[in-house]
Amino acid sequence: MEPDKFRKSRQAINRLCKNVDNLIEEKSLEASKEIYEEAYAQWETLNPLAEGEIQERSVKNLSVKINGLSMRIGKLKPAKKPSTRGARKGPVGIVWDEERVGQLSPVFLKKLAANMAKDKGATVCFGTTGKGIRPNYQIQFSNGDLTVFTGSGHKPLDKPLSAGAKKISKPFSHEVVTSHLGKK
């Protein structure tokens, strides 16, 4: 092959190899594979056209470089897909409404009503974390006292549910709780 044409072809392949090398450094698997394929195709075209010892040695050196890039591409890992396992679907937390309160078990509602101590002015707010089966809740009595209870044992807790972090529902009246209790 004519030396000038050979040199230009060899330089073009070297540029492609450099680009592949940069893409490998950036851990870009798909782009590096694409450019590698182009460099390999050009090398395959150039290989049989090499004449003389210098061109054959040059083609052999390119072959070593291309094989090295192939091995480095093989070590790259594909880009990670976003995990759906930990992804949240829909709104964060439980949205409490009267229907949802009515879905609580009768035993839970009886204990909740007992903790409201027949104070008709009392309101209850539910925690919005968890599954909503036995939520923690806080009762605001008509005299202003505030008591927080565990949902599992209905035992009083020391600290109120954190309203600032939107981990607490809107208040429900004593009447709402007892009306759902009467339906069950």
Image (cartoon, rainbow, N blue to C red):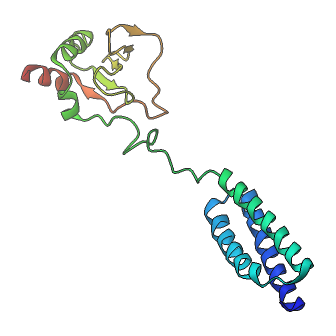
Q: Residue at x 42, y 31 (%)?
A: 167
What percent of the width, then of the height, locates residue 55? 87, 79
When the figure is inspected, residue 168 is found, relative to residue 174, above or below; the finding is below
Q: In terms of image quadrants, where is residue 85?
A: top left
When the figure is inspected, residue 31 is found, relative to residue 74, above or below; the finding is below
User: 172 left or right of 164?
Assistant: left
What percent of the width, then of the height, locates residue 86? 46, 38
Image quarter in which the N terminus is found: bottom right
| Count of marks placed on residues | 0
User: 73 left or right of 130?
Assistant: right
Q: In terms of image quadrants, where is residue 152?
A: top left
Q: As rendered, which of 135 and 112 lies closer to the eye?
A: 135
What percent of the width, then of the height, locates residue 95? 32, 37
Q: In terms of image quadrants, where is residue 19?
A: bottom right
- Outermost residue on the left side: it is 183
Image quarter in which the C terminus is found: top left
User: 56 left or right of 136?
Assistant: right
When the figure is inspected, residue 90 is found, relative to residue 20, above or below; the finding is above
